[in-house]
């Protein structure tokens, strides 16, 4: 039971670390989103403040992280900062591909180990 609790703590820490990456890069997340959406637009303070307000990141990283985790508990993984679309369909599609890749890799590793053991 303690091992499971430790793994949950590590998983939560990992998710929080990934969630804080936009602020840990020392680049304003609003500036990054502005350049991803429209590279030609000038990053004026008004434009950056508007993007922060639109994304809900004007409260800071802790506010964003707690809001995202609260939504995740309710089954809402959030919206893309770039396209504005829900991210849950893309995450589930990527999870399916990742699990398939993991299964094939496990099968190849098992067959390889079996062939090596059979020869000796």
Image (cartoon, grey):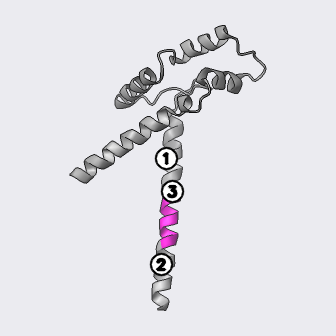
Q: Nearer the viewer, mark 2 or mark 1?
A: 2
Q: Secondary structure at mark 3?
A: helix
Dot 3 surroundings within 10 Å: few (below 14), some, or many (20 or more)? few
Measure how far apart labels 2 and 3 are at the Cα level.
20 Å
Magenta segment, prevailing SS (helix, strand or loop):
helix
The answer to whether the residue labelled 2 contacts the one labelled 1, judged by CB atoms less than 8 Å apart, is no
- Give x and y (percent) for residue 61: 47, 24
**Residue 2 screen position, x and y as percent:** 22, 51
Question: Marks 3 and 2: in contact by CB < 8 Å?
Answer: no
Location of residue 64 in the rendering, given as x and y in whole percent from the top left corner: 45, 23
Question: Crowding at label 2, few (<14), some or many (≥20) Cα neighbours within 10 Å?
Answer: few
Q: Quadrant of residue 42?
A: top right
Magenta region: 100-109
In the rendered image, the residue lying farthest to the left is: 1
Sequence-earlier tag: 2 or 1: 1
Q: Residues within 10 Å of mark 1 (few under 14, many from 20)?
A: few
Is the residue 120 above or below the residue 71 in the image? below
Horizontal side, residue 113 vs residue 72: left or right: right
Q: Is residue 72 left or right of residue 36?
A: left
Res. 113 mark: 2
Could you tell me residue 47's position as x and y percent? 66, 11
Q: Which residue is mark 3?
A: 100
Which disc, if any, is residue 95?
1
Q: Is residue 82 above or below residue 113?
A: above
């Amino acid at each position: 039971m303690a091992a499971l609790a430790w793994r949950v703590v590590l998983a939560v820490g990992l998710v929080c670390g990934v969630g804080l990456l936009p602020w840990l890069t020392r680049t304003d997340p609003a500036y990054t989103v502005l350049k991803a959406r429209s590279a030609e637009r000038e990053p004026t303070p008004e434009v950056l403040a508007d993007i922060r307000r639109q994304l809900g990141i004007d409260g800071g990283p802790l506010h964003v992280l707690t809001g995202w985790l609260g939504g995740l508990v309710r089954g809402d993984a959030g919206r893309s900062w770039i396209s504005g679309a829900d991210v849950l369909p893309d995450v589930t599609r990527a999870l399916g591909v990742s699990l398939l890749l993991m299964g094939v890799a496990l099968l190849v590793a098992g067959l390889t180990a079996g062939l090596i053991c059979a020869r000796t």
